[in-house]
């Protein structure tokens, strides 16, 4: 598609999106205010004088909405985006647009922008924009399947990963990519490649001439980085001169777990590989959930805290709370809080009990620990001793859900690096280990469950774990 046509289509799309916003605004007004008794009615709204100030406010709102849509990538190519990400980005954009409308309404005292109106507007604009984008996506898919609106791709490299990439995009004609062929120099695997149905366009040395004489929209780089570094840098410079889009596979180091993606670092573009840490708006929602739930539980459980503190103080010597240095996110140390369940010198006598350890691995667990106080056994069995960790959650040292923070002694006993990945996210009060048997499962299984949680993490998984924690605690299975 040439530049002029693209600009016309983009301009049309921008006007169309803003038109949908205006229609949703008008429809929300009609639905909500047509039968209102008192306040601003529809007739009142329609009879309002059109002032220059109102035009200025309306223009400002439209500009803000346009900026929001641009920020969320509405006017960039989405042919490779999944339907789920398309809907998710649209919902985020319409939510931010509605919040902007609420702010403007508050600043300029627009009486009709009540909470009910804003909610109705958000529903209407979300449904309309999502529907429009899905329909446009379907129409584009149909056009591309018929051989129109295609982008011609040249692939550098003939290794299995390059061939897999070509077969993957060829199998999805709706994406609108046409593989012209491959570029590579002689190597032992080239004889096998020639037996396939794929086309070898030229060698790397002749690429410049090939680019000059052929229509090419994108170049996908699959040359081995180590042996072809000089060639790759030359190809990048060549594509830059021709204005051709270059694609690099982010996973150039063949990482099995890390999630590579492009990222900006102080103005410089980097490929960032995320192997454990969580980021983005979901982690902000996770933190908000931690703060809200912790505050509610601390307020609700305050009488229980007072009773337990009194029982601990009256049944044994020492402080009510026990604090210990634990290993947190990225191995940062922090103090964890618990109700004291053992004698005051429990840490000092631990070396004498090492031979009684009942679990494999670096952790120390024995069912009938002689250091436990009379009330401590009950607190351990019911997990009430863990409740002060809600203060750790409020401080940000921990989360409600996450791998359990381990003592420094236990961490120093780790002998496998893959197990240490669990320390790359914030530790928590409960996790899959707590709802799947706790101390009754092996250390190896425990570590695998922590990594399973990290790899499958979502807010929904956190909510499910929290829901399963309550019956697991009441049952007391695996507590030690």
Image (cartoon, helix red, strand yellow):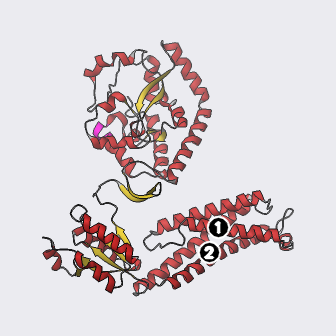
Residue at label 1?
A: 65
Q: Is residue 291 magenta?
A: no
Frontmost residue, 408 versus 316: 408
Q: Secondary structure at mark 2?
A: helix
Frontmost residue, 390 versus 208: 208
Identify the image quadrant of residue 416: top left
Q: Is residue 398 above or below residue 313?
A: below
Residue at label 2?
A: 17
Q: How many marks?
A: 2
Which residues fall within the magenta stretch? 441-446
Q: Residue at x 48, y 43 (%)?
A: 466
Horizontally, residue 216 falls left or right of residue 320, namely: left
* Label annotation for residue 165: none
Frontmost residue, 125 versus 105: 105
Answer yes or no: is residue 470 visible.
no
Query: Where residue 123 appears, x then y in whole percent?
Result: 64, 66
Q: Residues within 10 Å of mark 1 (few under 14, many from 20)?
A: many
Identify the main secondary structure in magenta: helix
Q: Residue at x 72, y 73 (%)?
A: 27
Answer yes or no: is residue 369 visible.
yes
State the separation of the CA atoms marked 1 and 2.
Answer: 9 Å
Residue contact at pointers 1 and 2, CB within 8 angstroms: yes
Identify the image quadrant of residue 291: top right
Query: Where residue 272 appears, x then y in whole percent?
Result: 39, 55
Q: Residue at x 85, y 64 (%)?
A: 37
Disc nearer the start of the sequence (1/2): 2
Q: Is residue 114 above or below residue 216?
A: above
Q: Is residue 24 above or below residue 102?
A: below
Query: Where residue 461 appears, x then y in whole percent?
Result: 45, 50
Query: Where residue 255 appears, x then y in whole percent?
Result: 29, 55
């Amino acid at each position: 598609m040439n530049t002029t046509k693209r600009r016309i289509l983009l301009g049309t799309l921008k006007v169309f999106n803003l038109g949908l916003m205006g229609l949703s605004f008008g429809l929300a007004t009609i639905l909500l205010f047509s039968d209102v008794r008192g306040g601003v009615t529809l007739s009142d709204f329609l009879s309002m004088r059109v002032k220059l100030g109102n035009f200025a406010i309306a223009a400002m709102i439209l500009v803000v909405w346009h900026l929001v849509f641009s920020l969320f990538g509405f006017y960039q190519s989405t042919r490779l985006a999944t339907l789920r990400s398309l809907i998710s980005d649209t919902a985020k954009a319409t939510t931010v647009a509605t919040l902007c409308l609420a702010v403007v309404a508050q600043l300029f005292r627009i009486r009709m922008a009540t909470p009910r109106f804003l909610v109705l507007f958000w529903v209407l604009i979300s449904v309309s924009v999502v529907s429009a984008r899905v329909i446009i996506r379907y129409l584009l898919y149909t056009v591309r399947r018929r051989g129109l609106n295609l982008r011609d791709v040249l692939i550098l490299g003939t290794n299995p990963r390059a061939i897999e990439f070509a077969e993957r995009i060829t199998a999805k004609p709706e994406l609108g990519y046409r593989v012209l062929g491959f570029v590579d120099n002689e190597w032992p695997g080239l004889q096998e490649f020639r037996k396939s149905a794929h086309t070898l366009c030229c060698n790397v040395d002749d690429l410049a001439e090939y680019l000059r004489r052929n229509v090419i929209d994108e170049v996908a780089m699959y040359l081995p980085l180590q042996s072809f570094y000089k060639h790759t840098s030359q190809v990048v410079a060549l594509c830059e001169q021709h204005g051709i889009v270059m694609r690099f596979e982010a996973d150039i180091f063949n990482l099995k777990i890390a999630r590579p993606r492009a990222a900006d670092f102080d103005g410089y573009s980097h490929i960032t590989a995320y192997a454990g840490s969580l980021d983005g708006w979901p982690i902000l929602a996770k933190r908000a959930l931690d703060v809200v739930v912790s505050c509610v539980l601390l307020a609700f459980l305050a009488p229980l805290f007072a009773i337990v503190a009194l029982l601990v103080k009256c049944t044994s010597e020492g402080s009510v709370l026990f604090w210990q240095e634990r290993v947190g996110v990225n191995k940062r140390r922090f103090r964890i809080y618990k109700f004291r369940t053992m004698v005051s010198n429990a840490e000092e006598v631990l070396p004498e009990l090492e031979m009684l350890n009942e679990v494999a691995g670096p952790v120390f667990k024995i069912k009938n620990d002689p250091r436990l106080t009379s009330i401590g056994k009950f607190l351990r069995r019911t997990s009430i001793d863990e409740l002060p960790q809600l203060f750790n959650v409020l401080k940000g040292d921990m989360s409600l859900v996450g791998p359990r923070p381990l003592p420094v002694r236990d961490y120093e006993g780790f002998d496998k690096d893959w197990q240490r990945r669990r320390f790359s996210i914030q530790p928590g009060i409960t996790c899959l280990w707590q709802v799947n048997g706790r101390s009754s499962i092996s250390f190896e299984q425990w570590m695998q469950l922590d990594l399973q949680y990290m790899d499958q993490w979502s807010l929904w998984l956190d909510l499910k774990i929290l829901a399963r924690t309550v019956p697991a605690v009441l049952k007391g299975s695996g507590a030690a």
